[in-house]
Amino acid sequence: MRRPETTRVVAPHRQGAAPRAPARSFASTLALVAPPRRAQAAAPSDHEPLAPLPYDVECAAKQDGLQRYWREHRLPGLPEPLIASPRPRGYRTSSKRRVAVRNGTVSLFLGDRPPVRETAPFVASPLEPAQHTEIYGALRATLNEPAFRLLAAHLHYLIIRGSYAERAVVLNVDALSGPLVRKIKMLAEQVRSLPLSALFVYLDPTRSHYHFESRRGLMTSLFERLCAAWAHDLESLLALDVPPRKKLEIHVRQIIRNYRRYPYTNRVMTELVTSSKPALAKRLSRNFVRPLVEFHERLIASLSRSLGAR
C-alpha cells in the first residue's frame, strides 16, 4: 500500500488565538506510533524503517498513524481501514544498490549516498525477492576480487530490473574504455550461474542519481560531449592542406564512421529536439546544428573558389 501524500495541512488560525504548531507530516506521525527501533531487528537502512517488523505490526502502526494524522489535520470524515497487501515482503522487481569502495572493500548500500555511520557492507532488504539478495551478494564477492578493482572503482550503481520470473542486472558506470569493457565481459562470464537473463551497461559520466525514466539531462550532456568532439574534427578537416573535394570525401567518410561508432545519436538528437523545451532545442542547435552549417558553408565556399580558379 502506498503511503498517503505528506502534504501539510494546517487549520485556519482564529484571530486572537495562540498560533498552532506546524502540523506533522504522515511520516513523522508514523514515527511516533511505530515500535521503538531497539525493538526491531537490524533494519537494512533508514530508507526502510518498518521493513523488519512483522507485517501485522506494521499494518497496525500505519492504521494508528493514519488516524492520528487525520485527527491532527482535522480532515473530514474518517479514514477507512487499510487493505493488507497480498505480497507484503519480497515484492520489489526493481532494486538498486549504491556502490562504494571503502578501505579497499566494495560495499553496496541502499539509497543514493553511503551512510555516514559504519554499517555492514551489504544488508538484504526484506522487500526484495531472495534472488536479488543472491545476485547482489555474488556480485559484491566478485567485485572484491583483485581482478575487478578497476571495474569496482568506476561502478556507481548496481541495478536489478525484471519480473518475478526473469531479471537483468544493469551496471551504472562513469566511464567506458577497452580495459573496462574487458572486465565487464569477465564479470558476465562469472555470473552465468546466477538467476539472471541478461547484463547491461549504462554509461553515466556525471555520476548522477540513477533513474531510467529521467535521463534527459544525461542524454543531453552525452550528446553535447559528442558534438564537442565532432566540432574539433571539423576544424581539423578544414585546416588540412588538401583540395576541397578531398575534404568533402573525408567528411562523408567521417559521417559514416560516426554513425557506425555511435548508432544511437540520430535517435537521441531527434528525441531531444522534438520532445524538449524550446530552450533545450536552442541549446542543441547552438552546439550541433550551427557548427555543422558553418562548416558546410566554409567548405562550399572553398569548393566554389576552387572551381572558379579553373
Image: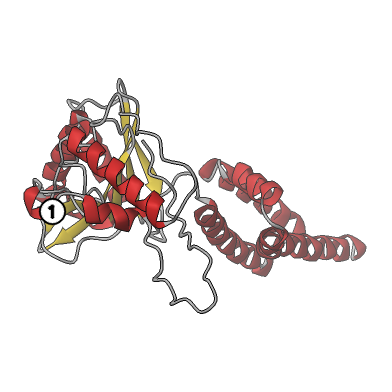
In the picture, the quarter occupied by the C terminus is bottom right
In the picture, the quarter occupied by the N terminus is top left
Label 1 secondary element: loop
- Specify whether 296 is left or right of 83: right
Residue lying furthest front in this view?
A: 16
Q: Amino acid at mark 1?
A: Pro
Vertical side of 36 occupied by 190: above or below: above
Label 1 sits on residue: 36
x, y percent for residue 293: 77, 60
Which residue is painted at 61% across and 50% down in the image? Answer: 254
Vertical side of 306 occupied by 90: above or below: above
Which residue is painted at 14% across and 65% down in the image? Answer: 117
Q: How is the image coloured?
A: secondary structure
- Specify whether 119 is left or right of 254: left
| Quarter of image, res 233 | bottom right
- Specify whether 168 is left or right of 10: left
x, y percent for residue 205: 41, 58
Let me know if residue 164 appears in the view: yes
x, y percent for residue 179: 28, 50
Vertical side of 180 occupied by 239: above or below: below
Which residue is painted at 23% across and 56% down in the image? Answer: 32
| Quarter of image, res 170 | top left
